Image: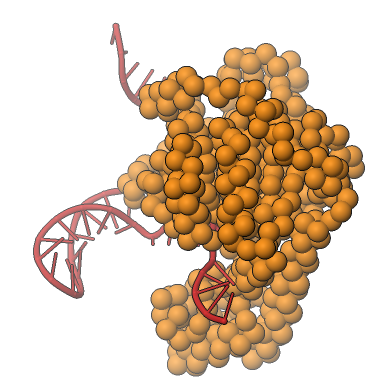
Chain colours: A orange, B red
Amino acid sequence: MSTALQQGLQRFYGYERFRTGQEEILESVMQNRHTLGVLPTGTGKSVCYQLPAFMRGGQVIVVSPLLSLMEDQVKQLRARGFKRVAALNSFLGFEEKQQILRKLQHYDLLYVSPEMLQNEFVIQRLQQLHIQLFVVDEAHCISQWGQEFRTDYLRLAEVIRTLDNPPVLALTGTATPEVQADIQHLLGDLEMDEHIYPMDRENIAYFVREVQDQQEKNETMLALLKKIQEPAIIYFSSRTMAESTAAIIRANLPELACAYYHGGMENEDRILIQQQFLAGQLQVICCTSAFGMGVDKEDVRLIIHYHLPSDKESFIQEVGRAGRDGGESVSVVLYSPGDWQIPVHLIEQDLPEKVSIQQLLRFLYQRVKAGHTELPAYELLIQHIPISETQWRFLLYQMEKHDIVKGNHLQYGAKAWKDFLDSIEKFVEGRRKHKLVQLQRMKEWVYTGTCRRQALFADFQHEVSQAKGRCCDNCGDTLTDWQASSAKTQPNRTGWREQLQHLLYQ
DNA sequence: CGGTATTGTAGCGCTAGTTAAGCGAGTACCGGAAGGT
């Protein structure tokens, strides 16, 4: 088995050896076992499903969270000569989509969004294929986004059943044991072979700086940025703050190329900024959590958290974007006492309030009574009930789960609705508590007096590796002499030209 | 003190014409594509 895999690796990628974990995961996949792979970030994950797609008969379906990730993959593969690859998403026009769907069996590898898998026709067509492997890429999204934000992730379990239970491969770079369990559970309680590799990095040092106000925060940030010539990412929980701080950096440190990035920007601008950062033309990115997935840059040296994420998992993920080349890197958290209000607010905002749920049910009941069993559009709903689109989708998923909604229609039953109201209120309360506990854990980490590396990973891994170089402020390390060591590695000045050319002409 | 606060996909698209609506188009498994010489 392993020689065949190695030959495949040589033939399709030109590599002699597998990277950590790849071979183990591939062997499990080739034996058609459900597999969970948690692999340190880098280029290695896609080999785990691309190789089976090239080597065996039948289709490989890859569920991917972002259009840009799908497009990148397809572009790269096509550039390397693999034509039997496609992405099925809203970039395509109706005709293009139909064309792909018509000739589905001509593709070995098909990328789709979880939302697309809710399209009945797409499912019908997929059912006619022989699916050799169903892949969920960036599988932590199931846990991180599934419950509230993108509920179609929770519907994947049903999709897998509808597709006659093909072998499933869930892949991610970071997943704590809790997230790992979540993934398996939410994919339909699958029994999976687990291949988990440690996610702590010995080359990242952790620092937390308490400041009194925003001005001090900015000063601290600018002082840190002054020390570097190499790429840095600064995370914010607010779009406007990301933008305004980018302006402050440009004004104070004109020698640094700095830009901002968040989900409210035009797609074109987002792609441009990300590519400029990857190509080394931008040193500092002020961004929200929108910046990250698909940002595969090796030499990021500094991650600053201007605001804090609402859980340790997100924090680990964001910090993990530094030092992928193994070079010494630094995470700095800046916090001032009031900062906790933001994540609390964001948590509250995701979940609907009791009153809103009651109002919604009353409104829907009146519609049913008037003979309208079909679901109202969100645009109509928002005129009567004050809920966000995210909250509406969350409730919609829950109503379907409780058989209050079937197809696009409301099913009324006095008892069923009453029971639903009770259970949904409990569920929402449970989610809220759970998220606040996660936030509390993050908070404890900030205030901890023990080794930050231990405190961050101890719950997640049996053994936390020793730091290579600096460890953390609680272990007595400082950043005063940091400039010297980081300046040793000269930035690669010619690199970006080649990279850009590669981007343009691939 | 008061403001402030994330994350993404899909939707049918085009046209004509300026604010609605009609039209064209299209997916059935079973096996070697399709473009370059």
For the N terminus of chain A, the image quarter is top right
Residue A90 appears at what percent x and percent y? 41, 50
Q: Quadrant of residue A396?
A: bottom right
Q: For this rendering, which residue is in front, A109 or A309?
A: A309
For the C terminus of chain A, the image quarter is top left
Does A341 appear above or below A63? Answer: below
Does A321 appear above or below A7? Answer: below
Q: Is residue A328 visible?
A: yes
Residue A446 appears at what percent x and percent y? 77, 56
Query: Which residue: 69% across, 75% down?
Result: A428
Q: For this rendering, which residue is in front, B1 or A261?
A: B1
Query: Which residue: 62% across, 57% down?
Result: A216
Count of numbered tags: 0
Residue A390 appears at what percent x and percent y? 54, 69
Query: Which residue: 45% across, 81% down?
Result: A381
Q: For this rendering, which residue is in front, B16 or A107?
A: B16
Residue A322 appears at what percent x and percent y? 65, 37
Does A153 appear above or below A385? Answer: above
Q: Is residue A160 visible?
A: no
Q: For this rendering, which residue is in front, A304 or A498?
A: A304
Residue A322 appears left or right of A441: left
Query: Which residue: 53% across, 22% down?
Result: A492
Q: Quadrant of residue A302?
A: top right
